[in-house]
Image (cartoon, rainbow, N blue to C red):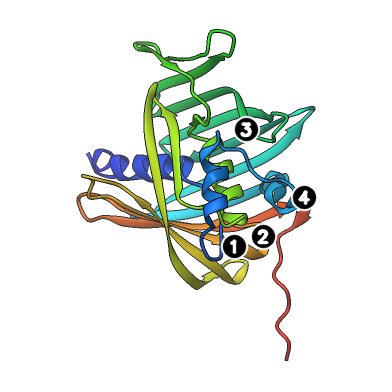
Amino acid sequence: MRINVYLPPIQHLIKTFILGSVILLGTLGTAQANDNKAEDNKTDCDNIGCDLALTPYTLSYAATYNGMDISAERQLKLNGDHYVLTTTAKNLFSRIEEEGAFFLDEKRGIVDQEYQYQRNILGIKKTEKLKYDREAGVANYKTKKKKRQVTLEGGYLNRLSYQVQLQRDLINQVSPLQYQVISRGRLKQYNFEIQGEETLDTPLGKIKALKVKRIREDDERETLFWFAPEWNYLLVQLWQREEGGEDYKIVIQEGSLDKKLLTLPKEKS
């Protein structure tokens, strides 16, 4: 019976991690930045910094909830002419894997190619797939029991690719942080708000990070993210409070960026 008590919040934590890893810093953008944001998520890449978000990385995270260990990994890699972003999170009873592929168009906007989500909790499996038919202008969502179709518009992203665009926007100080996301076959708007800077104690040392909050309406859950400017605003910590009052966090353990281990500069004596 204790499993039934623990699993729902752990499942939320794993799903929250997968839905929310991103990047950022600084003051929010200008009117010109807003214009760039509105035009189909195109980024002004005259500033090469916008593609720091596409630097390959591998990250490992861990958390403990009620004595149960949770581990997670996140990886961005370049495969030929397209990028693949994967996230895996697991504990003793659960495993969730998510993978998305995309490329950049001539204006360096994100073009999704495919998306897949797999979940196994106590042997109960679920798979979600999102396939794109660009000629027909639709995205087809499918599970074992459901099928849905979304008519594609400029700027629509999925539950992984929006995170890449958010990272690009934060690196380039673009606002507002709002995204049209295809989630489970339905179009939703994801909103984020910068909360300020904090210094975190982590296994890698003290990290200066930017705190960002996901803004939800009619939802008692609260989710906060911390991103490290030192490492292209990679996610270093996530915290969530559930509707029932339980709270937990997941913290970076180790990682690499552009095949170099994540390390902090030594403090001057």
Q: Give me the C-alpha separation between circle 1 and circle 3.
A: 23 Å
Residue assigned mark 4:
258
| Rendered location of residue 114, percent (x, y) | 58, 21
* Residue at 36% across, 56% down: 248
Q: Are marks 4 and 3 in contact (CB under 8 Å)?
A: no
Q: Earlier in the sequence, mark 4 or mark 3?
A: 3
Q: Give me the C-alpha separation between circle 2 and circle 1.
A: 6 Å
Mark 1: amino acid: Ala
The mark found on residue 183 in the picture is none
Q: Earlier in the sequence, mark 1 or mark 3?
A: 3
Q: Quadrant of the N terminus?
A: top left
- Decide if residue 231 is in sight here: yes
Mark 2: amino acid: Trp
Q: Give me the C-alpha separation between circle 4 and circle 3.
A: 20 Å
**From the viewer's perspective, is the residue at label 4 or at label 3 nearer?**
3
Secondary structure of residue under mark 4: loop
Residue assigned mark 1:
228
Residue assigned mark 2:
231
Graded by Cα atoms within 10 Å as few (under 14), some (14 to 19) or many (20 or more), the crowding at tag 3 reads: many
| Rendered location of residue 101, percent (x, y) | 63, 27
**From the viewer's perspective, is the residue at label 1 or at label 3 nearer?**
3
Q: Earlier in the sequence, mark 1 or mark 4?
A: 1
Residue assigned mark 3:
110
Mark 3: amino acid: Ile
Query: Is 223 placed above or below 118 here?
Result: below
